[in-house]
Image: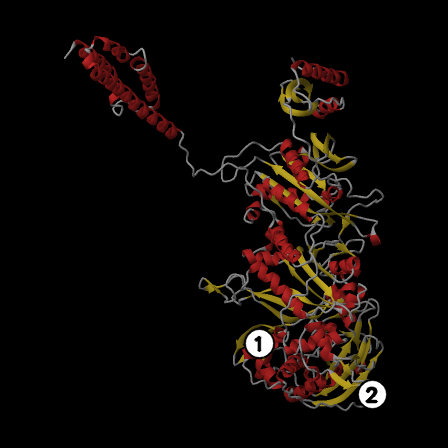
Amino acid sequence: MSEIDRQVDEIREAFEQEFGRFADLSTDVSALAEAEARLRELSELKIRHTGKKSPISGAMKLIGKVAPEDRAAFGQMVQAVEKGIAAKIEEAETKLSAFISNAKIESERLDVTIPGRRIREGHLHPITILRQKIEDIFVSMGYAIEDDREIETDYYNFDALNIPEGHPARESQDTFYTTEGFALRSQTSTVQIRAMERRGVPLRILAPGRVFRRDTPDMTHTPMFHQIEGLCVDKGITMAHLKGTVSEWLRLLFGPETVTRFRPSYFPFTEPSAEFDFSCFKCGGTGIFDGERCRPCKGSGWIELGGSGMVHPNVLRACGVDPAVYSGFAFGFGLERMTALMYSIDDIRHMFENDVRFLEQFR
Amino acid sequence: MNISYNWLNEIVDSGLDPQQVADQLTRVGLAVEGVHPHGDDFVLDIDLTSNRPDCLSHRGIGRELSAVLDNAMIDREVSAVPSSDAGLVEIEDADLCNRFTARVIRNVKVGPSPQWLVDRLEAIGERSINNVADITNYVMHELGQPMHAFDLDKLSGGRIVVRRARSGEKIQTLDEVERVLDTDMLTICDAESPVAIGGVMGGLESSITDATVNVLLEVAYFDRGNIRATSRKLNLATEASYRFERGTDVLNLVRASERAADLIRELAGGEKAEFVDIFAVPFVPRSFLSNDIAGAVKRLTGLSVDRTECIRILNALGIGSSQNEDGSLTFTAPSWRHDIAIEEDLVEEIARHAGYEKIAEELPPAFGAGEYQPTERRERRLRARLADLGCVEALSYSFIDERHDGVFEIVPGIIGNSTTEPYVTLRDSVIEGALRMRPSILPGLLDSVRTNLNHKRRDLKLFEIGKVFSTGEGEEGLPNEQKLLTIVMTGSESLSDRAKPGNQVEFFDIKGGLEAALDAVGCYEAVYRTANVKHLRIGQAAAVSVGEVEIGHLGRLDDELAAGYKFKQPVYVAEINLTTVLKLPTANAAYKPLPRFPSVVRDVSFIVDRTFAFDSIRTAITEQANDLCRKVSFVDNFEGKDGDRSLTIRLEYRSDERTLVEEEVEAVHASLLKGVEQKLQIRPQM
């Protein structure tokens, strides 16, 4: 081996010796800080052993002392050594960087199953939720939503609705009166009269609102509750339209399989009158759910919902509408009862106690 | 009402089993709620509507069933020859007693009823007393006609006078209660005093006992309204009054009387003696015209029922028909149907017997776009916004306790100026003390806070939107009804799904909630100023207004009031007249070009005392109307120990023409602060 070759070899050996501690990183690098220190040392080492001022770069100057015919071989040899040094450093750098970035990611690993951070959301009252759903359905069917007084004269609460003095429905046992002699409306049918007076006919309205009856609170009664009243008056309106409309909105609310049933009944403000039931949304009308008697329909398969009928000619006349020209249907039902059925609520007094443990269950 | 299947079969031979009978009756509107076996019989539990008193008997139900089956009722011919009226009965007040019959049965042996009668009564839930009493009860359930049996020998003068009670007259009724009568009540009297309250209950003194020998059987027809009024005034409702006030059959009296007299003769011995029938007010059947009954059915129900079938159904129900020369029909309501008066009533009779299930389902022809209440969209946004902020929607009763009177300051605009008595008050309530129609929603919500605290729910945000009331001078003097928004907050902010609570709720949280709520309904101009509000703690109360209009108030609940509710944590409340707010005009958003040059901000701090208002600094700056000063905002409020505080505000400067240079900003800034100093005598901290 020539002197020059030996010099190159020494440079290589000096590097290898210095680089030795980076050759196997797996044994002594375990922490992030350690790895970062190593990377700094490595970059210092890199500065010393690569680039124009490095020993191996200097070795190239020895080429002048090499016999011309050996110069090519010498040049290749030095370049190979230089490349080898650079490759080793780069490999170590890559390994260290990978370790570091991996360690950093690990150190910032999160438990993604911890709940997200947000204000606890509030809740709308179940009566509001149901009212809005039903309003949406009827607005889509061309109805105008109406709202009106909760305290009324006897005329609007009774007389105009064909409930004359002495009628059982007019018993003061059922109706709250103010000391001034006004009635807290006992049904939303009052809005029928107000709306026909205000809008004239033809019309289609839906009137949700509070009503009042002198019932002592118990599991199925509260002295205040909510009703929704629908009214459609036009030329040529028949009970078939009543059945079609009630069936349609119940299908829209409870699903396309819902079946509606009408039974003869009596209300002073409609003639003919009918009560309507719909096939139970829970058991689908079978009366049996999960092998047991279905709760909402009490095993009958039917849920009784409300009253309806063709607007009594006396009611139309009271609003200045000629019953020989116009006819109409009306229907009404209670929202608390419907809500209680939908959610299997056993005590409707919960509706007005505002216990958040109750209200939070609805969304 | 309970109907015996076997008994019914004696009236109509239906050939149906009990469930089939139930289904047929339900179909035509006599809702059978249940069929229960009873010995060798079945009992049908029927829920009748109030317009069908004629069905309050086996014969009445039988009549409907016979119309359904087109199968005639098994009827007995009845006649009774009145004996010469020997002054046995006198009607003084015929306006309240259209018809009165009396039958005397002599030499009766009062005793237990035979088993078949006991069983029949037991099946329908009635208790056996003695043969005579049981027979009157039995006939009522069979024919629908209430009646009363007197012990003839206990009637002074042996005669009956039907008259209004005299003022202060008393009677001890069968239930052994002494009742004081008034001059509007009809009584059945003997020669001296009342022996029964007509149509309601008999007297104890003249009632049938084991010692009775001679019986006077009263079967009568009374004015419906009068019976109802008497029953209400005496708070005494009986099977008899129930039927009389809804309406019985004035032409059914002789049949009922004869049936009872025959049964008494049969089961208690005795002979039928005198019979008196005073028909004081002749019965005039109600008749009305129908030009085209089948057409009317089609027009109202969409059902096609031919004229012959229409007439068959009506005739089967006892409704008479006769054809007029022009082809129209005159219909006559039977004496037992008080609810048949117009063509529409006939349509219902035909439709329910033809079957509601045959009516098609159609949607009415298209009509036009539907519409919400004009304020509904904004109210929905309001509800959604509050819910997003963590508020739970409450609904409280509209009536509240009188003890809240004067405790809460009522929101502006609710109570009119001229009224001396502002509150709407109920005559009585079903909830003790709850006589006031609420002028504020706060009492309801604070009760709800109490309820929730009792359940250890201490972090609460509740809101309610609802009507409040005050006496009014509006249409016919009807009360004012306006909508309020009320918010209550207490405890800590809570995070969804996390147990650790956030910051304690304070004044600025409810204010922020209210600001957000008002933004949601398009009200961006609300102004808040320090105010004294009755139910709010001094120094933590604000009045809210928009322009010149006062709309409500908010703040921390007064300490004493809070102590009354046993609240141990601060409760913050806000109440706003939503009716007023929703009437305010809303402006559409107006676009401003985006800034082309950067802005420069300067923060300044002032040492001020607690009564000082941030708003006054802002106003002092904005009213100098400098073009370059674009915005004055609140930065921070640092509370010192000695009552002073450091209030930091930020001024933002910007030009639309150029980038501002430092010197320019300094000059304007200094000038604005000088203006503040001159107006408010405060200097920024250096």
Front residue of this view, candidates B681 and A110? A110
Mark 1 to mark 2: distance in Å? 51 Å
**Residue underneath mark 2:** B86
Vertical position of residue A241 compared to residue A85: above or below: below
Location of residue B408 in the rendering, given as x and y in whole percent from the top left corner: 72, 39
Q: Residue at x 59, y 56 (%)?
A: A339
The answer to whether residue B127 is seen in the rendering is no
Front residue of this view, candidates A63 and B157? A63
**Quadrant in the picture for residue A205:** bottom right
The answer to whether residue A123 is seen in the rendering is yes
- Disc 1 is placed on an element classified as helix
Vertical position of residue B61 compared to residue A325: above or below: below
- Disc 2 is placed on an element classified as loop
Q: Is residue B35 left or right of residue B175?
A: left
Location of residue B467 in the rendering, given as x and y in whole percent from the top left corner: 72, 48
The residue type indicated by label 2 comes to Ala
Quadrant in the picture for the C terminus of chain B? top right
Location of residue A265 in the rendering, given as x and y in whole percent from the top left corner: 66, 70
Q: Residue at x 54, y 48 (%)?
A: A361
**Residue underneath mark 1:** B23
Foreground label between 1 and 2: 1
Closer to the N terminus: mark 1 or mark 2?
A: 1
Q: Is residue A43 left or right of residue B306?
A: left
Chain letter for mark 2, please: B
